[in-house]
Image (cartoon, rainbow, N blue to C red):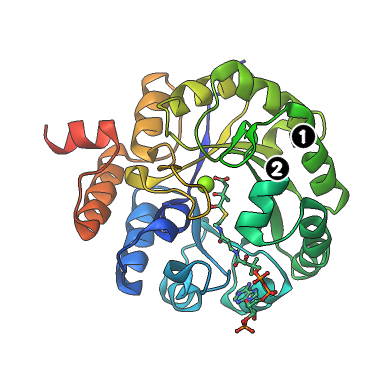
Amino acid sequence: MIPERVTLVDVGPRDGLQNEKQPVSTAHKVALVQRLQAAGLREIEVTSFVSPKWVPQMGDAVSVMAAIERPPGVRHSVLVPNMKGLEAALPTRPDEVVVFASATEAFSQRNINCSIAESLARFEPVVAAAHAAGLKVRGAISCTVGCPYQGAVTPDEVERVVVGMKAIGVDHCGIADTIGVGTPRAVQAVLERALKHYPLHEVSGHFHDTYGQALANILASLELGLHTFDASIAGLGGCPYAKGATGNVATEDVVFMLHGMGIDTGIDLDALVEAGGFISEVLGREPVSRAGRALLTK
Ligand code: HMG
Ligand code: MG
């Protein structure tokens, strides 16, 4: 049964801006979060508490979290790779933290400088401390369909990490197609493995659109009943450690498709398009979102 309502998590301020070569001011990041909230987004991945040597664009995580408005009903999440990240994040009062692992050893090493097993061991105290602080913990698993270093990835490899995440108490399982090579049946095969261990409402899809497959993959996920997806305003995004990984699926495009299917998102598409126009102007380029471009020039 296709769901009647879908929750979108806009990861643009984090996944989108982490990959920008040009500096983006804290004020612009805060203004983007503000616009997303105004457009009706109720879940926003704001920033990450990672090493600024590794990802300089997220070096102002504390300032961004301090400056954003925190209206009731909006949940703000942040990425944390280890206890140091969690300790820095906690005083900024995120609603949720995200630990991130990889389905492949090669990407795990490149992205967080440790093996998959080491990453799970690192996350275990993070999950416990986050829970003790009353926070929900989402887990993101990268390279679930393909890896820029290994190539093809099997559902078995992904399921091993899903099981590892579950064992350390991670509440939610995000399945990420980091380099966008997934096609609908392959994505369904991976989601089915996640759904063996997590309930429908605790599994989400995070699809980069490098090969133009993301909307098809969302539709394929909806067919399985999935109703939570990450998307990125204006199609921003990529991962500094996954060469060729372009942006996430654009939130505007996802909303256009879902509303066209009669699925409720709670999002005002016009305000969303305006938010996409705003950040694209800041970055000095056109929004990647096709719906955004069409509606902006209408
Ligand atoms: P490391 O070098 O192995 O860490 O990096 P370390 O523990 O040896 O520490 C080295 C230095 O980093 C020390 O500083 C630490 O204090 C500092 P120094 O003594 O040299 O001055 N450090 C930190 N500083 C700030 N915050 C921290 C932190 N931890 C250590 N939390 C580490 C390991 C995980 C830190 C590093 O590899 C890292 O920061 N990686 C981040 C990678 C990243 O952010 N990637 C992008 C996000 S994931 C993604 O985009 C995928 C996703 O969208 C899903 C998908 O599409 O696939 C989620
Ligand atoms: Mg990503």
- Amino acid type, residue under disc 2 in the picture: Thr
**Residue farthest along the right direction in this orientation:** 167
Query: Callout 1: few (<14), some (14-19), or many (20+) C-alpha neighbours within 10 Å?
Result: some
Q: Is residue 25 left or right of residue 264?
A: left
The answer to whether the residues at label 1 and label 2 have Cβ atoms under 8 Å apart is yes
The residue tagged 1 is 157
For the residue marked with disc 1, what is the amino acid? Glu
The percent coordinates of residue 52 (x first, y second) are 51, 74
Query: Which residue does the image show at 40% across and 47% down from the upper left?
Result: 40
> What number is the disc on residue 104?
2
Q: Is residue 247 visible?
A: yes
Circle 2 residues within 10 Å: few <14, some 14–19, many ≥20: many
Residue 208 sits above or below residue 168 on the image: above
Q: Residue at x 72, y 47 (%)?
A: 105
Q: Quadrant of the C terminus?
A: top left
Indicate the position of residue 289 as horizontal and vertical percent values.
30, 37
Along the polypeptide, which appears first: circle 1 or circle 2?
2
* Residue 49, image x, y percentages: 57, 70
| Residue drawn at 80 percent across, 56 percent down | 120
- Describe the element under mark 1 as helix, strand or loop: helix
Position of residue 280 in the picture relative to residue 64 (left or right): left
Image: 207 above or below 76: above
Decide if residue 100 is in sight here. no
Q: Secondary structure at mark 2?
A: loop
